[in-house]
Image (tube, coloured by chain):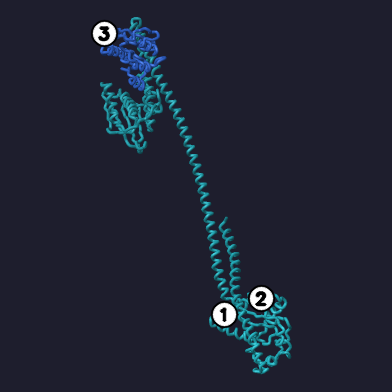
Chain colours: A cyan, B blue
Amino acid sequence: MAFWKLLAIALSVSLLMGGLLYQLVSYYVLYQAEKNVQNLLLSHRGLHQYIQRTMHPAFYAYRDAGEIPLTFYAPEILSSSFMVRVQHTYYNEARKEAGLPEVYYKMAATNPRNPVNIADEREARLIRQFNQEKGRKEYREVIEEGGRKYLFYAVPFLANAPRCMKCHGRREDAPIGLQRRYPGEGGFNEKLGYIRAVESVKVPLDREFFTVHIIWGSLFAGTVAILLLTLFNRSLRDTVLRRTRDLEIEVAERQRAEEEVRSLNADLERRVAERTRQLAATNQELDSFAYSVSHDLRAPLRGIDGFSLALLEDYSDKLDDTGRDYLQRVRAGCVRMGGLIDDLLQMSRLTRGELHRETIDLSEMASAVAEELRRQAPERRVETRITPGLGAFADRTLMRAVLDNLIGNAWKFTGKTAHPVIEFGSRREGGQDLFFVRDNGAGFNMEYQGQLFKAFQRLHATREFEGTGIGLATVQRIIHRHGGRIWAEAAEGQGATFFFTLPHEESYA
Amino acid sequence: MLKKTILLVEDNPDDETLTIRALKKNNILNEVVVAHDGAEALDYLFGLGRYAGRNVAEPPEVILLDLKLPKVSGLEVLERIRRDERTRLIPVVILTTSDEERDKIESYRLGANSFIRKPVNFEQFSEAIRQLGMYWLVLNQGPNGRKG
């Protein structure tokens, strides 16, 4: 739920609670004020009773005894309303001194003997009301006069009893002193049983309402605070719950993603394993194929050569020179084909199986190759320039095959050069070591370089330079297996340079 | 003269003929027994089948063993020879067309005394046979110590 909606609800509840609290507190405070008013009225009533029951009998006793003249009348002594009024005046003075607000008190009558006691409009209305509803014992109301609030409280005075009628009946029946003291008609001609006055009290409620506001304010503020806290707490809880839900969803999503990755990985691994198996099977087949080739192709070749020689040896007298020449050609073919088979086997053998990379000294290897070539053809004078200390991280056996082929080729194709020079060196280019084998031999036309590394493709006639056309194909496959490149630059009659690259050791880390 | 028999285990008739011819050409005139497959070689060596009743106590002086053979392969024949007390000391020369590294390693592991690849060129083949005969039949002192 939206925060603002909640806030609105909280505020409404607060206001409702505030109203209720206000009513409750007002009621309580007014109740307390009313108690005080009642005390005041009761003390006044006590004074009335004192005059009626104590003073009057004493006075009449003294009069009857002739100690007081018949005409004597002193309202200061005998009028309870007078005495109460005076006493209340002193009471207010005392209150004033005590710093308390004055309390309005009046014994109000519609037909008073003393005009001071004349009932105002509200009091007159109340007198009528009390007379209509005889059982009613009190009236209370909070009124506002001159911007101040008062508790207005009224109780009916005594209903006229027969003994009251002596003074409040017909004028001529009243004691003479009374008649003299009050020349008007006020206070006379009352009816028996009629409630002729109300005691009305007005107490200012400033203090009380101040108290109400303080208490209500505290309670209301407390309520609002609690509500807001509840709301905040709820909102906090909502937020926490929402975040928790979000997090749970996220976690679930991640788990799903992880699961997916795992299953993808598993699938990938399975496929890799499958491919590896297939490759292994293919390799196995290639292996057995190569084995068969090695064994089965060579055997008949040996037969052809062997029996050709047997013919030459055992039946040479039955053959003329041409026949013998033919047989020699048959034998030469056999030897060439044997070499071809051997080269093919070497290529297949060198290019399958695992690479065993290690740090090797290519310069040393190149020198060994050159040495071997010199040993095989001691009659040749070939200058070799080998840059020392050229290292590589590669398979020793395969790199030996590479140098055997490249330097062997250089050796072969410089066979008709006056001052043959074979060079092995390197230079750094684009972060890679670039090795090269250079010769000043027959070279070749760059137009045909596309054929260079293809198996069985030869750029020179066999009668010119021997070869099977497999060497460079093997070299290229080895370099490619190492992740390197190989290419050549040459010109016919001006020698050839073979370049190859090998990745650095760090690239395998 | 000592009766030194050569056991030639060879399934290819061309190779058989050429080998025997090469032996003769090089004046190696020992008796050559030819077994045409691995099973026949074992029969000969252990006096079984066609060779039942042969005196097993007279083993050949040297065995020339091809690897690629029908029925029982050359490597298996070699293994059986080396496993049996009666034949384990006979020199065995592997004479094969193959030059597969694993064949060489396996042959030596199983106790071959030599591994020779048959060259295509007959002159070279003949030379190999000559050296073989010279070495195993003349120079080498066999374990048998039989008198002639």
- Camera-nearest residue between A71 and A318: A71
The residue lying toward the viewer, choosing from A226 and B111, is A226
Cα separation, mark 2 vs mark 3, equals 161 Å
Using residue A149 as the reference point, say whether residue A395 is left or right of it. left
Could you classify mark 1 by the number of other residues whose Cα lies within 10 Å: few (under 14), some (14-19), or many (20 or more)? some
Q: Position of residue B136 (x, y in %)?
A: 28, 13
- In the rendered structure, the residue with mark 3 lies on which chain? B
Judge depth for marks 3 and 1 and give the one in front: 1
Identify the residue under disc 2.
Answer: A139
Three-letter amino acid code of the residue under disc 1:
Pro
Instruction: Give the quadrant of the N terminus of chain A.
Output: bottom right
Q: Give residue A295's position: percent from left, percent from top.
A: 39, 17
Would you say A234 lies left or right of A449 here? right
State the image coordinates of residue A96 (x, y, percent, origin top left).
55, 82
User: What kind of element bears circle 3?
Assistant: loop
**Reading the chain from its start, which is encountered first: label 2 or label 1?**
1
Name the residue furthest front.
A65
Task: Identify the residue under disc 1.
Answer: A101
Marks 2 and 1 sit apart, C-alpha to C-alpha, by 22 Å
Which quadrant is the C terminus of chain A positioned in? Answer: top left
**Amino acid at pointer 3:** Lys
SS type, badge 2: strand
